[in-house]
Structure formats: C-alpha cells, structure tokens
Image (cartoon, rainbow, N blue to C red):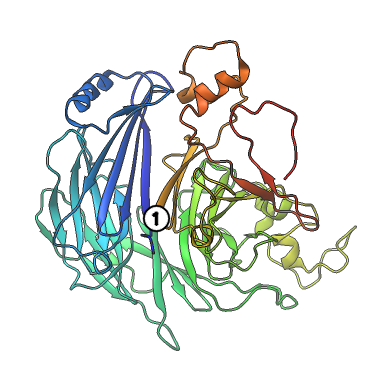
Amino acid sequence: MGYQPILDSFEEWVGGHWSSRKQIVVWGAGSELYLRSKRMGQAPDFASEDVLVEWQPSFHVDQHRHRSSWAAYKDFRFVEGRDDITSVNLLSSLSGHDHELIMVGRASGDLSLLKVSTSGLQSQVVNEFATNRRPIRSATINKLSNPLLAVCLSDSSLALYPVRPEDKYTEPLDVTTIHASDKPRKLWCTRFLRSDRLAIGLGSSCDPIRVYDVTPDGLSKEPIRRFGFGSQSPASSEYPNSSSVYQLAPLDPTSSGGGAEGDIFLSGGYDGNARLHDFRSPAPFTAVFSDVIDASSAVYSLSLFGRERFIVGSSQNCLIKIFDLRLPGGKMYYAADLDPCSSDPPRGPGMTSVTCCQYHCHSKDKCRDCSIFLHPRHVRGGQISRREGMSPVYSLSSPSPFSPTFFAGIEGKVLEVDVVSVMDHHPDPIFRSGPKRTGNRALDLRRKWDPRSEVLSLPLYEQLEGNINLRTQRVVGDVGPSRKG
C-alpha cells in the first residue's frame, strides 16, 4: 500500500507583471515531507534563484521557463506507519525568501513547526507543541499577524495554540472536549471560517457541523451555531438526519455567493453530497451538490477552485467532481434562496410534485458539472493496476483563487492539474513563454505543452441523468476532428 498524501499550497504575486508569481506546494508522504518551489515570470528576486543551480541537481526550468526546485525533510526518529504525516499547513505570511515555515502534525501525536530551506541550508524544527501524544487528525491556521492554530486531537479534543516561531515549546491556549448528547462522536476536521470563527466536522451526528467563536481566552463555551442535514420542510424526507462531515471549506467573500467573510462555507462527508451553508439563512443548508452517477461515494477531500467553482475528491476510483457554485443542481444561487421553506410546495410547469425544500436545493434544469478520473486508461509501460485505479482522492489543494492549477493526492502520488486549453491562443499569462514556433501545428503544441510526453489523457463524464458519455482527453498535438469515448 502506498502513502496517503496530505497537501497544502499557496501562490502569490511577486512582481510587476501578472505572470510573475511564486508557487509553493508541500505534501506529506508517509513520515517524510516534500516541498516544491516554483518561480514564474519576471521579478526582481528571481535572480537569486541562480544560486539553486549550484547546489541542487533537481533544479529545473521547464518549457514555460518556470523555475522549480525541490526540498525534502526526513527526521530519522520517525517510523513509517506509526509517525505518518496527517496534517500540513503552510505559514506563507511568516515564511522568508529562502525558507518556508510549515506546521506538521503526525499520527503519533507529534506537532511541530518546521523551517524548510529552499536555498541549500539545513532544515530544522523551530517550535514543538504539547499534545500529550494524542494523534493529530486535522489542523487549521487563521490569517492574523499573530496566527492561531486549531488542532483536532484524538477523537474528541479540540486544542487552540498561539503560533510564535521564536518560541521553542508551546502549550495550548485552550483545550475543549466536544461532547455529544447521546454517544461519543468522532472529531474529523476543523477549519477557520474567518479569524474569529472556527467550524468543526463530527460524525455520525444529527448536527455534524458546529461553529464556535474564538476569543482571546479560547473557544466559546457553546457553539454559536449548529448545522444539520435535515430539511426544514416536514414533507421532505430526502436527506438523512445523521451523517459525518469529513471536510469544510469557507467561500471567498468575493465569490458570487456574496456575504461577509465566514458567512458561507461548504461541507462534504459520508453521504457523498457537498452542501452550501449560509449563516444568513435559518436553514441547515441552502444548496446541495451531487454527482448523480457517483452519488454514494464519501467526500474525502474538498477545495475551492477560483471564486466560482469547487472540487470534491471521492472515496474511490481516483475521481474528482468539479461543481459550479453559481449552478447548484442547475440553478443560480440567489439571496432569494434564503427564504424559509413553506409547507405549501410551489406550483408551476414541471414542479407539480416538488416540495419546497427540494425546490430550494435542486432544479428541473440539467447541470453541466463534470467528473474526472485522475488515472488514464493506459500509461507508459502498460495499463495501471486495479489498486491504483480504485484509490481515493485523499487531498486537494488550490494555491490561490487566481491560479489555473490545483493539486490532488491519490495513493502514492501527487498530481498537478493545469486547467488550460492548449488550443487557446491567449492562455493564462504564466503559460505565455515557450519555444519558438516551427510552423508545424502539432509539433508546436507538443513542444509547448508536453515536450516529455508527461501529460495524462484523463477520462471524464458530464454529470447528467440518463445516458452517460464517457470522454477522454486527446493526446497533446492531436489536431484532428473531435471524437467521443
């Protein structure tokens, strides 16, 4: 069995041109940590990257003139399996030009802040956090100048820590035991919705999402809001009353959903659906996103992609599902959706048997979201194994709202996915540079987009009811007529 990658990434603008960016991706591979730093475009600090050529043989310049370098961290005290990495968080606001600060949590209960060098210097542990050796399930860091770290410890404890790189050892500011009214609930995930608002995901529970205020003294004694999966309409029994939530993701306040920071967030869990939750609405959720073809696979990972879309990682088949926030179930999400449900279902063409709650969450119109299998039918050297093809998507990360790239972790691998059309004459500015054209269209496409034959031709399908058309991406350089299958 391969490792289960745990990912984080960020991308920032670092120069006077839109294409001048710095991108960092870091992932845990068993007990080891890997980091890739990529510089794109032209920026004043890029000249210092020449130093990397002297010391690091893995320094690489690709066909787009992006400069990449790699770093790895392995502590020989840690053993594979027992000390596997279970959480990774980049502290981009506190990192320096030649190093990155990374919060790393492990299954054995070790929680430490690492300073990983990207300039050939030795990486080191700069701060350790007291956990009483309780396993780390999930961790999140807010965006304050003096950040706070929230950590799920073992099955039922939530700890809050100040993050100060100058300290050597940090005790928790507050530790809260999450109680349930009837029986123990496992604490699966936690996420800052904003700097003073923290959400947690539980399971299995009738109210698997609970939100707390964060104060200078710690967490509020009781949740300020609980979100369940039941419908407000007495006539509707479509949604289960009890489920588990494995992932949470706050929406960017500039997205089409609107609202203040922390008002709107997404959740995903055991029942396979992604839900949109809105603090402005009394309803437990305001939209449901579901793949009608693969409706029963649990949501193992969840990430925003841009400001209008998000990606869900399935529990099987290396499958990711891309949804448009503007079209939940095929209809726009408006503030009118916040109106309370009525016991009298609305009447109209095609809506004679639709309850009000179903009407809020779904539509008669077909959606145009899609699902992509992150493994090709064939790879160099033959077909992939059945085990590789059945892997869950353990983690997803998008570096920034303006990046055309996201990363996905499947068993034993991390994939980089660039959402771009190779036929586009004006792609994202980071792909502007490339080799000179020869006049041969197919050859020019291969030289610019896939000079080493590394691009995978992935199968996908649209999330439509009825007949399913499975499609496969063309090989880069194939400029013939389109074809299905």
Task: Please say if 366 is above or below 211.
Answer: above
Left of 48 or right of it: where is 376?
A: right
Please give the name of the residue rendered at 75% of the width and 50% of the height, measured from the top-left corner. Answer: 469
Q: Assign a secondary structure to mark 1.
A: loop
The residue closer to the viewer here, 44 or 207, is 44
The residue closer to the viewer here, 480 or 124, is 480
Task: Please say if 178 is above or below 168.
Answer: below
- Location of the C terminus by quadrant is top right
Residue 113 in percent (x, y) is at 19, 53
Task: Please say if 266 is above or below 381.
Answer: below
Left of 302 or right of it: where is 283?
A: right
Left of 458 or right of it: where is 200?
A: left
Please give the name of the residue rendered at 65% of the width and 51% of the height, measured from the top-left corner. Answer: 335
Q: Residues within 10 Å of mark 1 (few under 14, many from 20)?
A: some
Q: Is residue 251 visible?
A: no
Task: Please say if 437 is above or below 287.
Answer: above
The residue closer to the viewer here, 155 or 40, is 40
In which quarter of the view is residue 97 placed? top left
Q: Is residue 83 visible?
A: yes
Please give the name of the residue rendered at 34% of the width and 76% of the height, measured from the top-left corner. Answer: 155
Which residue in the protein does label 1 denote?
412
In which quarter of the view is residue 293 placed? bottom right
Residue 268 in percent (x, y) is at 53, 63
Q: Amino acid at mark 1?
A: Gly
Question: Residue farthest to the right?
Answer: 349
Residue 286 in percent (x, y) is at 63, 60
